Image (cartoon, coloured by chain):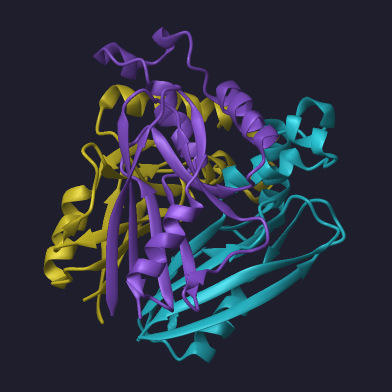
Chain colours: A cyan, B yellow, C purple
Amino acid sequence: MKTFRKELFMNLAERRWYVNITPEVSACIEASAVKEGFVLVNSMHITSSVFINDDEPGLHHDFDVWLEKLAPHAPTSQYRHNDTGEINADAHLKRQVMGRGVVVAITRGRLDFGPWEQIFYGEFDGGRRKRVLVKIIGD
Amino acid sequence: MKTFRKELFMNLAERRWYVNITPEVSACIEASAVKEGFVLVNSMHITSSVFINDDEPGLHHDFDVWLEKLAPHAPTSQYRHNDTGEINADAHLKRQVMGRGVVVAITRGRLDFGPWEQIFYGEFDGGRRKRVLVKIIGD
Amino acid sequence: MKTFRKELFMNLAERRWYVNITPEVSACIEASAVKEGFVLVNSMHITSSVFINDDEPGLHHDFDVWLEKLAPHAPTSQYRHNDTGEINADAHLKRQVMGRGVVVAITRGRLDFGPWEQIFYGEFDGGRRKRVLVKIIGD
């Protein structure tokens, strides 16, 4: 069994943003030389997500409006987590809706994807450096 | 390491529906001859889900009412994704709540499940042919 | 390829509660002797979750208030699942938001985690014995 590991670095100026990381994950698969297996891609932070959906800016706007409705940032005093001095409790909740990460099949050395699937990093508490883990196992 | 891959085809008349695909996944495991490993089951489309919950029609009704409350289909004009000519933005959101797919352990050649776990395909934008990926790795 | 399997037992007096199970999962990885691979940790029940977030009591309170707002327990008559004699339909919904389980990378014999990641069991219908599956594959 072969394994491969790489960290991707994110540093977004905005509090919330969505970045297509599919090319970086594909490059990892090529570098791993794994032809058949699984790739795990997950945020190493608990206020951001890795998820699979559509690369369409209108949809990303919709995600953002919707997540803010489900788990509003303000008033920050509504969350007990923010009593610790943080103001990012909403980011911990938003990340649960969008998920920590994804497992994707690798077939014949490539991401085994449907026609519109793309991998995104979803930032909900930006303005600082964060990491995404790519781990591959297979043959 | 053995690997196995199969696509399941779904074509539901309804916009939203829930289908138990556990027998099809179990048949894949048997065909793979894998005794110990992981099976990944995921929708290859970004407006549907694969998830694990209870095979109880009342609960599926509750899922449907609840998802429509969290991410309503209408008015379709509330979503910027629908400016592209689509009317399925809500399906992209609903799929995030229910998840893209599941990873299940295989032990002694079978799904390693608790007493009530069953695998479902959740359709949120039906009326056309879609695919579910089953990928198995193990020994 | 090595594999390892263990069940963890949970029996919480409260209807809803959050338990840090990271030490138990780490002990499984050590016992497995797997240095590079994946560990799957999932609830074997469909009214509880395994997820990764912060070990901070204020945040767990926030999760609880938020989940109760998204999928209220009462009135229990609002859910058709509860016509079966159950009163736990809300727990089936809450578990979808928080997820069934997680896949975590194992690197150099340890959980490959960011600085704050911890694994939690989330109970939404307690008062009885439940199980969590830990399954490891790798070399």
Q: Position of residue A126 (x, y in %)?
A: 81, 56
Query: Going by the image, does C64 lie left or right of C15?
Result: right
Position of A91 relative to C85 (above/below): below
Quick check: A58 above or below B63? below
Q: Which of C103 and B5 is in front in this view?
A: C103
Residue C38 lies left or right of residue A53; in this view the side is left
What residue sits 33% from the left and 25% below the top? Answer: B59
Nearest to the observer: residue C33 or residue A115: C33
Residue at point 83%, 27% (across, down): A77
Quadrant position of residue B1:
bottom left
Which part of the image, by quadrant, shows the C terminus of chain B? bottom left
- Name the residue rendered at 62%, 34% in the picture: C60
Find residue B118 and report its image quarter.
top left
Q: Is there any visible trace of residue A75 in the rendered image?
A: no
Residue A53: image location, x then y, percent = 56, 57
* Residue A85 locus on image (x, y percent): 85, 40
Could you tell whether C27 is left or right of C17 in the image? left
